[in-house]
């Protein structure tokens, strides 16, 4: 399949602005009606008013539409094809979910309404709390956290509150995290004030039990783990791991960002975890990326339910209510009911799939990842590090180290060359324990034909690397933007994120 991304010489919307152009037309208002309209400016305190207009661009409606459609043509999206960004679970998002949340019975609700008038949505969210508990094998959930990373923070704050309640926080200062963990894990532990102790993986890509045994002590507050881990490998010794941590007086926290691999088959609660967060936006299909929007509800076994962030939705058999009265709660993490739209989409998704549908999700996610692994094993230049021959779960990490050694073409070059073939790149250089890592997560929503297109592209890139490495190193050429200077692109001194910053740099 030949691919050429659209390339528009598109000026910034501010540069396209023409004085006097307007993107709306409103009917004339009679003087009598005008007098009845309150003057909003007078309501705004003097100190908050601007001294001059905000300087917005002036364009007609079709001009605005053209501008954004052109920009979208210079972009890649999940609805165009495979988006195998490992660990991010970029799956197809059914538009039906969007229709559900646009229903005025949801979209016109005001969060300040009295609970007695919110019984419908509270019923839905109460049921969602229960379903998440059932799916993950814990006892209760709070929908408060607005992202996976915030769910993690909630989890470690619960660990902290629990040890404080036991009078042991002074000594229990350490959170143990495997070296294959997602970067947000150590960040969350550090934000909650803990010291991070890293345990290495063994040759099979699993937590090294001996290292774990020597890492735990009476200073252990808990362990943060995802299973399957970021190598896509299931931690077979999870029950032993749980026992080691529990025997030392620590709690087990499950990073549920990878729940896609487990849905309907195995539950973190049954593995011995005390606390879990679930990335609703990945597991239950919500468009996400670039930092949002997401939801990372946090769930716990019953002995920790008093620590959950509030409000938790409760039901007394007659009416639904918001329970904010948990004396040991870690408090609020978000306004109102959390990221309500994402929770609603997750509810619609789970309801439509049912238990069998959720099982089919994990079956296909795992099948697709292993199909890709088996095909890539045969491509010269790529290897499967850790536990060769062992089935992966939802994702597979490959190494382009042999290719780099033979030809100088790196994992980054391979990722860029994939863009030239109309595919999104996998995550690269993560996890850090794999040299020249390419982390591929196909998800369950792409067909065999699309997976074969990806594999064929990798074959082609591999071949090209051995015959014309320079060509691969110069990719991408067929995209709207060719290779960026990544240091410059991410440097705060050169990154112009707003019109104002851009103007400043021009000067
Ligand atoms: C394993 C893992 N944990 C945590 C997160 C953080 O989730 P979020 O991006 O919603 O903050 C991710 C995100 O990709 C992840 O893959």
Image (tube, rainbow, N blue to C red):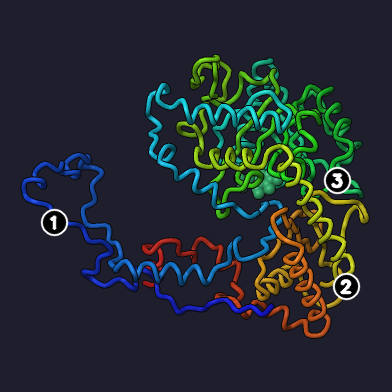
Q: Callout 3 environment at 10 Å: few (<14), some (14 to 19), or many (20+)?
A: some
**Tags 2 and 1 in contact by the CB under 8 Å rule?**
no
Q: CA distance from mark 1 to mark 3?
A: 70 Å
Q: Mark 1: which secondary structure?
A: loop
What residue is rendered at 58% in x and 38% in y? 347
Q: Nearer the viewer, residue 222 or 193?
A: 222
What quarter of the picture does the C terminus occupy?
A: bottom left
- Residue 177 at x, y percent in the picture: 76, 39
Tell us which disc is closer to us: 1 or 3.
1
Disc 2 to disc 1, how far (Cα)? 70 Å
Q: Nearer the viewer, residue 328 or 99?
A: 99
Rendered location of residue 203, percent (x, y): 92, 50
Q: Which residue is mark 1?
A: 28
Q: Position of residue 358 (x, y in %)?
A: 71, 42
Q: Which mark is residue 201?
A: 3
Instruction: Give the foreground label among 2 and 3.
Output: 2
* Comes first in the chain, label 1 or label 3: 1
The total of numbered circles placed on residues is 3
Residue 448 occupies quadrant: bottom right
Name the residue beneath numbered marker 2.
380
Asked which secondary structure carries label 2, the reply is loop
In the visual, does 227 lie left or right of 73? right
Question: In the image, residue 8 lies at what x, y percent?
Answer: 47, 78
Q: Is residue 73 above or below residue 24?
A: below
Which of pointers 2 and 3 lies earlier in the amino acid sequence? 3
Residue 480 versus residue 31: which sits nearer the camera?
A: 31
């Amino acid at each position: 399949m030949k691919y050429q991304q659209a390339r528009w010489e598109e000026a910034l919307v501010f540069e396209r602005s023409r004085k006097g152009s307007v993107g709306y037309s409103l009917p004339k208002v009679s003087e009598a009606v005008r007098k009845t309209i309150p003057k909003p400016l007078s309501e705004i305190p003097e100190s908050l008013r601007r001294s001059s207009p905000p300087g917005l661009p002036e364009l007609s409606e079709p001009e605005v539409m053209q501008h954004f459609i052109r920009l979208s043509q210079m972009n890649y999206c999940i609805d165009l094809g495979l988006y195998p960004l490992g660990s991010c679970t970029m799956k197809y998002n059914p538009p039906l979910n969007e229709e559900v949340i646009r229903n005025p019975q949801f979209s016109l609700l005001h969060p300040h309404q009295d609970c007695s008038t919110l019984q419908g949505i509270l019923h839905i969210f109460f049921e969602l709390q229960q379903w998440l508990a059932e799916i993950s094998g814990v006892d209760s959930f709070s929908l408060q956290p607005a992202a996976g990373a915030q769910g993690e923070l909630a989890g470690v704050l619960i660990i902290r509150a629990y040890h404080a309640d036991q009078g042991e926080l002074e000594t229990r200062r350490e959170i143990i995290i495997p070296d294959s963990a997602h970067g947000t894990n150590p960040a969350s532990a550090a934000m909650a004030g803990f010291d991070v102790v890293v345990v290495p993986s063994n040759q099979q890509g699993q937590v090294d039990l001996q290292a774990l045994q020597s890492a735990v002590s009476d200073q252990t507050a808990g362990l943060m783990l995802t299973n399957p881990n970021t190598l896509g490998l299931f931690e077979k010794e999870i029950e032993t791991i749980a026992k080691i941590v529990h025997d030392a007086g620590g709690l087990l926290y499950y990073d549920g960002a990878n729940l896609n691999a487990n849905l309907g088959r195995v539950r973190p609660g049954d593995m011995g975890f005390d606390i879990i967060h679930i990335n609703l936006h990945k597991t239950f299909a919500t468009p996400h990326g670039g930092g949002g929007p997401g939801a990372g509800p946090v769930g716990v076994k019953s002995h920790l339910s008093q620590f959950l962030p509030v409000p938790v939705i409760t039901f007394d058999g007659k009416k639904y209510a918001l329970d904010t009265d948990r004396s040991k709660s870690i408090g609020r993490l978000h306004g109102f009911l959390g990221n309500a739209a994402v929770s609603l989409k997750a509810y619609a998704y789970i309801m439509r799939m049912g238990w069998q549908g959720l099982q089919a999700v994990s079956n296909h996610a795992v099948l697709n990842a292993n199909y890709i692994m088996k095909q890539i094993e045969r491509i010269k230049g790529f290897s499967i590090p850790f536990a060769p021959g062992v089935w992966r779960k939802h994702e597979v990490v490959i190494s382009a180290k042999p290719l780099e050694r033979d030809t100088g073409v790196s994992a980054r070059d391979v990722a860029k060359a994939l863009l030239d073939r109309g595919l999104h790149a996998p995550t690269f250089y993560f996890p850090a324990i794999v040299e020249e890592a390419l982390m591929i997560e196909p998800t369950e929503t792409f067909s065999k034909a699309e997976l074969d297109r990806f594999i064929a592209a990798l074959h082609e890139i591999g071949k090209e690397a051995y015959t014309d490495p320079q060509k691969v190193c110069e990719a991408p050429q067929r995209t709207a933007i060719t290779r960026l200077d990544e240091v410059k692109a991410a440097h705060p001194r050169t990154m112009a994120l707003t019109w104002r910053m851009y103007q400043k740099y021009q000067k």
